[in-house]
Image: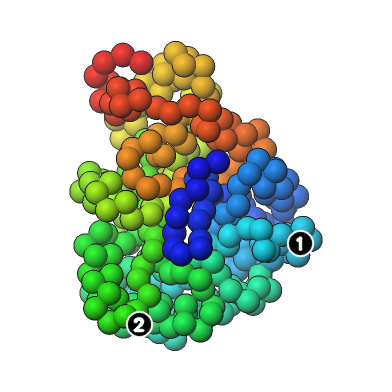
């Protein structure tokens, strides 16, 4: 599988595995089975966050690592500094809060460092300088091999890395964004700190080749549910169902799937990979079968014309 270079000596497989409801007791056995199969298929990068299941995802990650003895063979991505759930307008980006969340994730997993630690959200009201100082301190202390962000705009990333370069500090190495054939907006998701990929962001990622971890390729199961004639669950319904364009894209996705003989999951995975960015596809799966369908993306690449058809309906599949 292709690898994406994140920092010196640190590279991720092009498909990273999300939490898969890890840390929810009734889903643990299934999640661990998906994790096992992911490694068998060649994957090496696991994503987690302090806020997932109130630390449960981190604890389960540690349990799996210890039971399999794989800490040295895989990459662990941690995320912290999610906003205060009681007040979306109160961010948690002080140096103390940044370090506290990483310390807790490491303690929950019972590991001594994160391979990549990300800030879960931004607060554009704050200057980047103290944030970069805090993140650079995590690398200097050996608590993270590299640092980055999630849901940051490219302008803030550029500003932060200019400051880091000018002051000999650790730069941001990666960003996680909603990146999917299915469209949504921060207003629709109800989270003003959410930054979905758009043409401006994608243009910079293509030009700079700054690593991006794209989550949402499978649209939280929306594509699969609608393709099967089922009503989507509450979350994917809220994110995607109200936009007519998503329904049109599903029709085109289904036609392309029939034309080239590849699953919807494989095509939506390849779509994120093949848009020209230096992208890691980050996805969660509820079964090993879904995971294997995503790995099917390794057997083909989407053409420019196929991507244009998926996005606009122009041309044929």
**Percent position (x, y) of residue 170?**
38, 75
Left or right for 83, reference 35: left
Residue at the location (51% across, 61% down)? 10
Question: The C terminus appears in which quarter of the rendering?
Answer: top left
Left or right for 63, reference 177: right
Q: Residue 37 occupies which quadrant of the picture?
A: top right
Question: Which mark is drawn over residue 69?
Answer: 1
207 lies above or below 160: above
**Percent position (x, y) of residue 222?**
47, 35
Q: Residue 133 occupies which quadrant of the picture?
A: bottom left
What whole-number distance in Å separates the C-alpha atoms at marks 1 and 2? 34 Å
Q: Nearer the viewer, residue 28 or 187?
A: 28
Left or right for 242, reference 266: left
**Percent position (x, y) of residue 40?**
70, 43
Q: Would you call the spot at circle 1 few (<14 residues within 10 Å), some (14-19), or many (20 or more)? A: few
Question: The N terminus appears in which quarter of the rendering?
Answer: top right
191 lies above or below 273: below
The residue that disc 2 covers is 133
Q: Secondary structure at mark 2?
A: helix
Left or right for 258, reference 134: right
């Amino acid at each position: 599988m292709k690898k994406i270079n994140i920092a010196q000596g640190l590279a991720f497989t092009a498909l990273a595995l999300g939490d898969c409801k890890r840390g929810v007791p009734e889903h643990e056995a299934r999640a661990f089975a998906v994790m096992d199969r992911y490694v068998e298929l060649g994957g090496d990068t696991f994503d987690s966050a302090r806020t997932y299941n109130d630390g449960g995802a981190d604890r389960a990650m540690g349990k799996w690592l210890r039971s399999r003895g794989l800490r040295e063979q895989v990459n662990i991505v941690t995320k912290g500094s999610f906003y205060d759930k009681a007040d979306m307008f109160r961010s948690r980006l002080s140096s103390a809060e940044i370090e506290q969340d990483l310390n807790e994730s490491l303690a929950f997993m019972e590991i001594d460092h994160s391979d990549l630690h990300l800030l879960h959200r931004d607060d554009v009201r704050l200057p980047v300088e103290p944030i970069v100082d805090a993140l650079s301190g995590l690398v200097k202390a050996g608590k993270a091999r590299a640092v980055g962000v999630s849901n940051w705009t490219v302008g803030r990333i550029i500003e932060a890395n200019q400051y880091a370069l000018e002051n000999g500090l650790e730069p941001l190495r990666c960003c996680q964004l909603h990146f999917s054939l299915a469209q949504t907006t921060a207003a629709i998701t109800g989270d003003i700190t959410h930054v979905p990929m758009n043409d401006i962001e994608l243009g910079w990622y293509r030009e700079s080749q700054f690593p991006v971890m794209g989550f949402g390729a499978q649209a939280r199961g929306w594509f699969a549910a609608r393709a099967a004639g089922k009503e989507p669950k509450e979350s994917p319904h809220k994110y995607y169902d109200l936009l007519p364009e998503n329904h049109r894209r599903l029709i085109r996705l289904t036609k392309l799937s029939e034309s080239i003989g590849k699953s919807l999951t494989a095509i939506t995975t390849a779509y994120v990979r093949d848009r020209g960015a230096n992208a890691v596809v980050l996805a969660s799966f509820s079964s090993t079968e879904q995971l294997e369908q995503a790995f099917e993306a390794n057997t083909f690449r989407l053409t420019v014309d196929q991507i244009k058809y998926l996005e606009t309906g122009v041309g044929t599949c």
